[in-house]
Image (cartoon, helix red, strand yellow):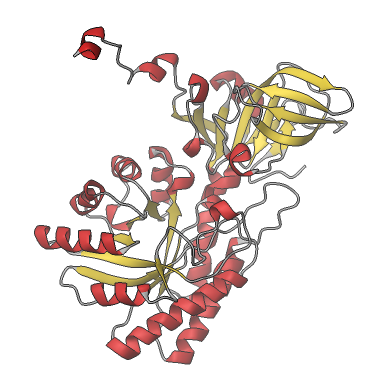
Amino acid sequence: MHLYGTQTINDQGHLTIGGTDSVELAEKYGTPLYVYDIQLFRDRARAFQETFEKAGIGYQVAYASKAFSTIAIYQVAAEEKLSLDVVSAGELYTAVKAGFPVEKIHFHGNNKSVEELQMAFEVGIGCIVVDNFYEIDLLKKLSERLEQPMNILLRVTPGIEAHTHDYITTGQEDSKFGFDLKNGQADRAFEQTFDNDYLNLLGLHCHIGSQIFDTGAFQLASEKLMQKMASWKEQFDYTCPVLNLGGGFGIRYTEEDKPLEPAVYVEQMIETVKQTANASGYPIPEIWIEPGRSLIGDAGTTLYTIGSTKEVPGTRKYAAVDGGMSDNIRPALYGAKYSSVIANNANAGLTEQYTIAGKCCESGDKLIEQADLPVVAAGDILGIFCTGAYGYSMASNYNRIARPAVIFVENGVSQLVVKRETNDDLIKQDLPYSQKAAQE
């Protein structure tokens, strides 16, 4: 069994996280339950930052908060001196309410609304990552009307396809994101922004995919973007001070995954940027990155209670839990794989193989197809590892199932940071049918 972060097995054979007994957590807070190992999040943040500092390179490490967005995690991110990547008015509003330093917030998205952009100006965020020509026009009009400057990065697609799932690959030419480098879109976007009175062009941004296990694609992207910025310096005498290489660094979900340490990705990026800059006589820019999953993914464990079991002779055994695709859509959405443990019997021999079924009314609601476990019984606590990214953030109320609570654990202390939804929460936005209104 691979344990993550501060996880251990105690004398009772229980899984512990952050110095707390997972069985006691399940009893105290109920299940399903998202449990976050905050020390692991802190350690990952510091590992990225320390690599830049050792290299003497200006940088920002921005937490890509689409992975997991709550007031509490934004506050921890601020404590760790991270920047923040948001992609909606909701994420920006949450960050503001959390007291996150607005000057360190970067706003992403391929179809930002006028209202969202106005909000970005009103709160004074640090940077907008511009995705298309429509957005350039909106930003010009807004900044001129408000007489307020705004830092921007141009998101580009460098034509590099990282080896990952098609649904989460974004750096290739055929993408809904960004200006293409090859067909001249990036050059036109540069010409429309670099000498604007209110838009301060910092540089280029790219994101080439997710769950990437090697450095080759990042090195190639770094080289291409640096070469483009060097060409603009030669042609327009304009030097971009920032290069944002996005995120996508992989984590270990199962034994098949072989991720690199955070320092390795960063070291290779820095080396490529330095070499390309030196070759072209270009000043070494600040390097910004946007880890999300690699900061928070394996810091999260979801605890479930096992209920019914079923055996299909000669085919498989099922063990059903009290959650499912409503709290983790990733297995059903794109075949994500996870590993697991019986948290109340973690030292038991792995003698059986179960399909972990969710409780939603869908045949495809299976969290793990083949989970190696001991014989399980109703009431056992199942822990599924590495659910910290895109579990809570993509959770739904499908089948009118209430979303789970979220807790942080650290130094032997647990803290509730998101309350479990109630049935009343599920209907609080509903309005009754009015026959009179229907007739009108």
> Total of numbered circles in the picture?
0
Residue 62 pos. (x, y %): 42, 57
Q: Is residue 429 left or right of residue 5?
A: left
Q: What residue sits 64% from the left and 66% below the top? A: 214
User: Which residue is nearer to you in this view: 113 or 319?
Assistant: 113
Q: Residue furthest top?
A: 435
Residue at (20, 50) in percent of width and height:
118
Is residue 43 shown to the viewer in this render? no
Picture quarter with the N terminus: top right
**Quadrant position of residue 244:** bottom left
Judge whether 422 appears above or below 289 on screen.
Answer: above
**Residue at x-position 39% and y-position 54%:** 85
399 on left or right of 164 = left
Q: Position of residue 155 (x, y in %)?
A: 39, 65
**Residue 100 as seen in the image, left or right of residue 1:** left
Residue 186 visible in the current orientation: yes
Query: 266 or 214, which lies in front?
Result: 214
Which quarter of the rendering shows the C terminus? top left
Q: On the picture, is 235 further left or further right than 358?
A: left
Given residues 166 and 320, the one toward you in this image is 166
Residue 51's spot in the image, x, y percent? Answer: 53, 68
Whole-percent x and y of residue 381?
Answer: 69, 24
Q: Is residue 180 above or below residue 309?
A: below
Q: Give the residue drawn at x 62%, y 35%.
A: 19
- Asked if 190 appears above or below 125 in the picture, the reply is below
Quarter of image, res 30? top right
